[in-house]
Image (cartoon, rainbow, N blue to C red):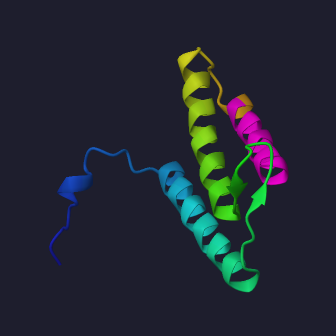
Amino acid sequence: MPDFAWPNFAWMAWTWQTAAFFALIATLLIVMTGLALRWPEVPRRGILRFPTTRGDRLFVTLLGAAVIHILWIGLGGDAVWPAIGASVLFGAAMFRWA
């Protein structure tokens, strides 16, 4: 069997942490699809002042988590655990009040 290399993916550091991250995102998308099929989404107005669905709130949560982590690393945070905690709190607030 020839050794197959993925030349287009050689730039990425594929570690178990990277795989876990992408698996988590894929799982979130599958769960959100299942929720939308089981209980159709009803847009609601929250603190953002425009109607959002569960998918919208998930997108804003993921985007906000990325910004929180970039700011944390940019401002010199060594450990990312506080950024993870802030992201979880931000996500909980988005799904509760947005």
What's the residue at 53%, 49% (across, down)?
17
Question: Furthest-right residue in view?
Answer: 96
Q: State the image quarter where residue 34 is shown.
A: bottom right
Seen from the viewer's position, the closer of residues 64 and 46 is: 46
Q: Is residue 16 left or right of residue 64?
A: left
Tally of numbered discs: 0
- Vertical placement of 42 versus 49: above or below? below
What's the residue at 63%, 40% (across, down)?
65
- Percent coordinates x, y for residue 81 in the rendering: 71, 33
What's the magenta region?
A: 83-98
Question: Furthest-bottom residue in view?
Answer: 38
Prevailing secondary structure class for the magenta stretch in the rendered image: helix
Seen from the viewer's position, the closer of residues 36 and 52 is: 52
- Percent coordinates x, y for residue 74 in the rendering: 53, 19
Q: State the image quarter where residue 48 is shown.
A: top right
Q: State the image quarter where residue 44 is shown.
A: bottom right
- Percent coordinates x, y for residue 22 in the rendering: 51, 58
Q: Is residue 96 left or right of residue 91?
A: right
Q: Quadrant of the N terminus?
A: bottom left
Seen from the viewer's position, the closer of residues 20 and 64 is: 64
Seen from the viewer's position, the closer of residues 31 and 57 is: 57
Check residue 93 for magenta coloring. Answer: yes
Question: Furthest-left residue in view?
Answer: 2
- Vertical placement of 88 versus 81: above or below? below
Check residue 1 for magenta coloring. Answer: no
What's the residue at 63%, 47% (across, down)?
60
- Percent coordinates x, y for residue 66 in the rendering: 57, 38
